[in-house]
Image (cartoon, rainbow, N blue to C red):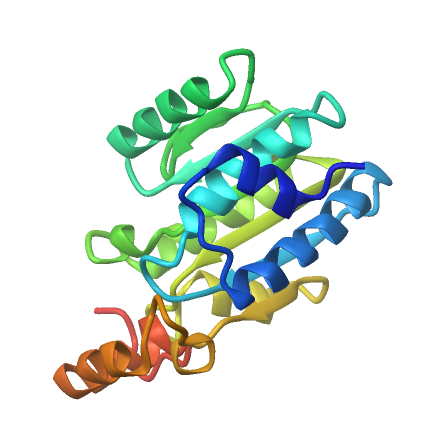
Amino acid sequence: MLKFNEYMNNTFKDLHEHSFLSDLFSNLDNFKDDLLNKKSPRLIVNMPPRHLKTRTLALGFPLFLESFKKLKIAVFTHNYPNSCYLKNISLEISEYNEVYYYFIGHEIEKEKFDLIIIDDPFYFYSAYKCEYINNYVSNLLNKNLNKNGGFILVESRYSVNDLTSYLLKNYNDFKLLKYRALDIADQHFSLEHFHRIKNNCRQIFESLYQQEPVCEEK
């Protein structure tokens, strides 16, 4: 049976499989098994910017799942142009896929999905309050997810009131994967690179790169 790391390496020829990606891919294989077995898996993935969040979770994983079973999958990103961009890229990879791409705030009425993925709403936080995003995603979970469906949030942490914090406080069934920059540094993302960012702005570094927010959203 095809593994997710095999699919990603076959699909994205320029992919460098870092050690943290190997761990993530393995966890996503487990998530896939739970989803297909109707175990209602819930997953939060926190990782630094520019570490292949979107390529992995918003593009690769939904298309990988479609090779096993026809599922109704919705991916929500931070704005409408980005949702259109991701849809176009997904069609270049697989022209027959039927993954739905929306933006946070898109009105979803009675639609039901087998899997909902929220892709890095960080850019959304600066324009709207965390409370709006939290309520919107809560409605998706409670009203738009099939009974045995799965849910994934992938994001870099932003504040102590962000979506990761909200979901962990209000739901007890989420598994959390946390990839800190200083733990996953390698030849492609060096310690020197991360320390330069840290020296320039420690507060942002602790949140976005170390996944340990120290401030509230304003």
Can residue 203 be spotted in the picture? yes
Q: At which x and y percent is residue 172?
A: 70, 67
In the figure, 72 relative to 125: above or below?
above
Q: Identify which residue is drawn at 80% across, 47% down.
A: 34
Is 50 in front, or is 34? 50
Residue at x-position 33% and y-position 70%: 189
Which residue appears farthest toward the left when viewing the image? Answer: 200
Image side of residue 95 versus residue 68, left or right: left
Q: Is residue 93 left or right of residue 205?
A: right
Which of 92/131 is in front?
92
Marker count (numbered): 0
Task: Quadrant for the N terminus, please.
Answer: top right
x, y percent for residue 125: 27, 57
Relative side of 158 to 146, left or right? left
- Say if 10 sits above or below 197 in the image: above
Q: Position of residue 133 (x, y in %)?
A: 39, 51
Q: Is residue 215 visible?
A: no
Q: Quadrant of residue 65?
A: top right
Quadrant in the picture for the C terminus: bottom left
At x 43%, y 43%, the residue is 55
Tell me where residue 22 appears, x and y as whole percent: 60, 60
Query: Which corner quadrant of the image does residue 102 belong to?
Result: top left
Which image quarter: residue 66?
A: top right
Q: Nearer the viewer, residue 122 or 24?
A: 24
State the residue lying farthest toward the right.
37
Q: Is residue 138 positioned above or below 200 on the image? A: above
Q: Residue at x 53, y 37 (%)?
A: 60
